[in-house]
Structures are given as structure tokens and as C-alpha cells.
Image (tube, rainbow, N blue to C red):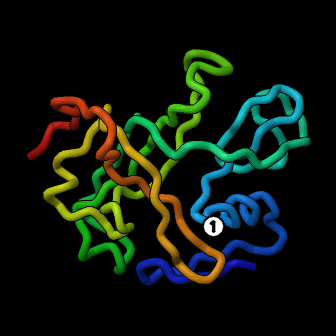
Amino acid sequence: MLQGDHMGMTLTVLDLDAQNLGYFGHCAEHAFHLQQCAKCDLLHYPPTTTCPFCGNPEQTWTPVEGRGTVYSYAEVHHAIQPGFKGHTPYMVLLVELDTQKGKPTEHDALRVVGNFVTPDGEMAPPEMVKTIGIGSRMRMVFRDVSEGLSLPMWTLDEAADQPATPWRYAQE
């Protein structure tokens, strides 16, 4: 079992959850891996017991570059969890990875959820949150929660070309 505290919330991955134990085991090493189907060769997220594309149960963990583009986001202004209240507004990003674009169809993609953080894994301050939107280029970083448990998060990819004005929902 993996267990840790993240901003006042207890996170638990039970021993019966082999797929998430594998996923978070790689994250604890600050390495991003996804399951790859042995039959159709497609990668997928989140971890599952069978390939969501062809149903094959045989999969291997494959290293994947944690870089991509913001596909969508939620900007949270009213945190429900007490540990997040001091960090509002904060962003939860859905990032479309550069890996496996357009497969199995042009509508499918590898999209990974994570909080928007500074390069050192701390929640991004409001002035940074205002600069991110759909089209922003991101890279993955990991926040250590406890021994053996790290969470994948997203930070701005300083080495990538950024859109002049990323698309954002209308603001107040």
C-alpha cells in the first residue's frame, strides 16, 4: 500500500490496485510511464486492466516524455479541500501529450490531468495562473508526497515556443 499526505488530504493506493501501484511506482522515480498494449501497440491513460482500444489484457509500462499542450483546464476559485484554500485561484490542467498524436483516430489522444505548479512543484501563484490557457506548452514535474509516492504535475515548458495569447475563459 502507498499512502501519503498531500496538502492536508490523505492519499492511498491499495495493494489490490496493481495498475495504480505500477503507475505511481514510476512517478516515485520521477519517471513518467504509461501502459502500452502488447496487441495494438497503443499507449493509454489512466492505468487500466485492459487496453481501452482493443480489450487486450497484456500491457507493458513504457517511458513517455511528459511534454504537451493544454487541451482544457479548470480554474478553481473556491477550493473545497481546506489545504487548497490558501492557493486559490489554482488550475487543474488537461494536457494533451506530444506522444501518439492522432492515434487511434484524430479525436483520440493521450491527455493527462494534473495541477499547474511552479518548476519546483509548488502550487502556481495567481500571477502565473493568469498566464496559462489552452495552447500553453507544459512539461511534467513530480511532487513527492511520501516515500514511494509522487504526483505528476504540470509546469510551463520554458524551452518551448508559447502562444502569444493562450485561449482563456472569459474573466470577471
Determine the residue located farthest toward the front in the rendered image: 159
Q: Residue at x 47, y 78 (%)?
A: 6
| Screen quadrant of the N terminus | bottom right
Residue 167 lies, with reference to residue 3, above or below; the image says above
Give 114 or 84, whichever is nearer the viewer. 114
Give 144 or 12, whichever is nearer the viewer. 144
Give 168 or 67, whichever is nearer the viewer. 67
Q: Residue at x 62, y 43 (%)?
A: 64
In the displayed structure image, the side of residue 113 where residue 54 appears, left or right: right
Question: Residue 101: image x %, image y %?
Answer: 56, 24
| Quarter location, residue 109 | top right
Question: Residue 128: image x %, image y %?
Answer: 19, 55
Determine the residue located farthest toward the top in the rendered image: 106
Residue 66 lies, with reference to residue 90, above or below; the image says above
Residue 167 lies, with reference to residue 148, above or below; the image says above
| Quarter location, residue 62 | top right
Question: Residue 41: image x %, image y %?
Answer: 79, 29
Disc 1 is placed on an element classified as loop
Task: Identify the amino acid type marked 1.
Answer: Glu
Q: Residue at x 57, y 63 (%)?
A: 30
Disc 1 target residue: 29
Question: Residue 126: image x %, image y %?
Answer: 17, 60
In the displayed structure image, the side of residue 124 where residue 57 appears, left or right: right
Residue 111 lies, with reference to residue 78, above or below; the image says above
| Quarter location, residue 37 | top right
Determine the residue located farthest toward the left in the rendered image: 172
Give 28 or 93, whichever is nearer the viewer. 28
